[in-house]
C-alpha cells in the first residue's frame, strides 16, 4: 500500500487509513498489510494539526493500492505532477482510494468520470457542480471498479474494516474494530449525517427522525408546528420531548443548525452572502446578516477577512 498524503490533510483522516492496517497486523500476529508514506515530489508536508510528514516521491510508486489522503486547499495542492502521477498509477491497474478530499483530487485528474463516487458531506454540492461527469452519491464510502472514495475519517474506518473483512475474514475485522472500541460499523451505502443522532435515537427515535428532517430542510425550513404535525405530535409534545433529548428548544436548535451551516459556507466556499442566505433558508440577505451577527458577533464579510 502507498499512503499519499497532501499538504493540509487532517491527522484523523490519515490515522483512519493507516491505524486499521496496523491493528490488523497486530491482531493477526503477522504482516498482512505493509505501507509506505508518500508526499507530492517527496517533499515535507504539514498536516492541519501542525504535524510534519516526510514521504517518498509517488512518481516511483508501483504497489497494489494507493490511498490518497487530502484535506483543505485542494485546488492549490492538486499539482500537474500529482495529476499525471495519479493517471499513471491508475493506468497500471492499481486500486486508488480517496479519503476525505482525496475524491476531489481523483475527480480533478479525470479518474472518476462516469464512476460512482462520494466525498465529504460539506463538499457535496460544490463537488457536483465542479465535476458533473461523476455519479456523486452521499454515501459513507463508495466502491466502483478500481476506484474507492470515502466521505471522511469515520467512513474511512468503515471502509478499512470492510477491506480487512473481504481480504482476511469478518472475525479479524471485528477484532480490529473492537481494538478501537468502534462498534457502530456502517455499510458503505449508509448516508453521511450532518447531525450525530445515534445516541438520541436509542431513547428518542422520533426526535432523531426530526433532527434528520431538519438537516435535510436547511434550505427551506418549515416552522416547528409543521414539523410536529408531520410527525404526528402536538407542538407542546414536540417541544417537551425535544428539550429532554437535546437540552434545547427545537426552534433555537434549528436556527443554530442553519447558522452553523452559513458559517461553514462563509469560510469554505466562494458563495455570495445572498447565495448563503438561500442555501440556509433565510428569507433575505438582511435576515441572515442580523441572525449571523447575533450568533457570532461579526458579519459574514468580516469572518471571511479573518480567515
Image: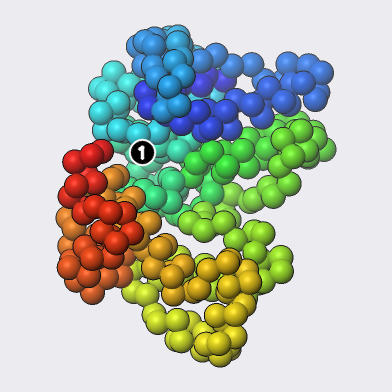
Image location (x, y in percent) of residue 231: 56, 84
Rendered view: 291 above or below 71: below
Image location (x, y in percent) of residue 275: 20, 61
The residue lying at 37 percent from left, 63 percent from top is 258
Q: Residue 74 falls in which quadrant of the image?
A: top left
Position of the C terminus by quadrant: top left
| Helix, strand or loop status at disc 1 | helix
195 relative to 83 in the view: left or right = right
* Closer to us: 223 or 149: 223
Counting the numbered discs, the total is: 1
The residue lying at 74 percent from left, 21 percent from top is 25
The residue lying at 55 percent from left, 80 percent from top is 239
- Residue position for label 1: 104
Please indicate, yes or no, whether residue 146 appears anywhere in the rendered image. Answer: no
Are there few (<14), some (14-19), or many (20+) residues within 10 Å of tag 1? many
Image location (x, y in percent) of residue 3: 51, 21
36 relative to 166 in the view: left or right = left
Position of the N terminus by quadrant: top right
Q: Residue 262 falls in which quadrant of the image?
A: bottom left
Please indicate, yes or no, whether residue 219 appears anywhere in the rendered image. Answer: yes
173 relative to 139 in the view: left or right = right
Q: Residue 102 falls in which quadrant of the image?
A: top left
The residue lying at 45 percent from left, 10 percent from top is 54
Rendered view: 177 above or below 20: below
Rendered view: 150 above or below 89: below
The way the protein has been coloured in the rendering is rainbow
* Closer to us: 16 or 301: 301
Amino acid at each position: 500500500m502507498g499512503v499519499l498524503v497532501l499538504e493540509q490533510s487532517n491527522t484523523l483522516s490519515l490515522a483512519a487509513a493507516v491505524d486499521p492496517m496496523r491493528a490488523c497486523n497486530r491482531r493477526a500476529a503477522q504482516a498482512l498489510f505493509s505501507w509506505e508514506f508518500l508526499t507530492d515530489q517527496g517533499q515535507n508536508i504539514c498536516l492541519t494539526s501542525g504535524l510534519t510528514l516526510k514521504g517518498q516521491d509517488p512518481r516511483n510508486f508501483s504497489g497494489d493500492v494507493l490511498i490518497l489522503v487530502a484535506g483543505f486547499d485542494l485546488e492549490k495542492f492538486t499539482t500537474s505532477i500529482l495529476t499525471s502521477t495519479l493517471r499513471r498509477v491508475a493506468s497500471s491497474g492499481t486500486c486508488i482510494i480517496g479519503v476525505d478530499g482525496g475524491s476531489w483530487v481523483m475527480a480533478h485528474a479525470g479518474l472518476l468520470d462516469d464512476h460512482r463516487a462520494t466525498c465529504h458531506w460539506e463538499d457535496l454540492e460544490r463537488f457536483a457542480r465542479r465535476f458533473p461527469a461523476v455519479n456523486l452519491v452521499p454515501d459513507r464510502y463508495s466502491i466502483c471498479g478500481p476506484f474507492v472514495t470515502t466521505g471522511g475519517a469515520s467512513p474511512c474506518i468503515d471502509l478499512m474494516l470492510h477491506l480487512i473483512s473481504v481480504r482476511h475474514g469478518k472475525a479479524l475485522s471485528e477484532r480490529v474494530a473492537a481494538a478501537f472500541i468502534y462498534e457502530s460499523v456502517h455499510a458503505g451505502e449508509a448516508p453521511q449525517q450532518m447531525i450525530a443522532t445515534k445516541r438520541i435515537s436509542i431513547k428518542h427515535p422520533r426526535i432523531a427522525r426530526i433532527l434528520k428532517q431538519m438537516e435535510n430542510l436547511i434550505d427551506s425550513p418549515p416552522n416547528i408546528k409543521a414539523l410536529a404535525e408531520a410527525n404526528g405530535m402536538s407542538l407542546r409534545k414536540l417541544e417537551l420531548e425535544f428539550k429532554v433529548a437535546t437540552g434545547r428548544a427545537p426552534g433555537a436548535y434549528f436556527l443554530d443548525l442553519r447558522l452553523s451551516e452559513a458559517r461553514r459556507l462563509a469560510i469554505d466556499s466562494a458563495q455570495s452572502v445572498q447565495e448563503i442566505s438561500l442555501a440556509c433558508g433565510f428569507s433575505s440577505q438582511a435576515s441572515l446578516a442580523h441572525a449571523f451577527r447575533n450568533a457570532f458577533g461579526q458579519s459574514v464579510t468580516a469572518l471571511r477577512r479573518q480567515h
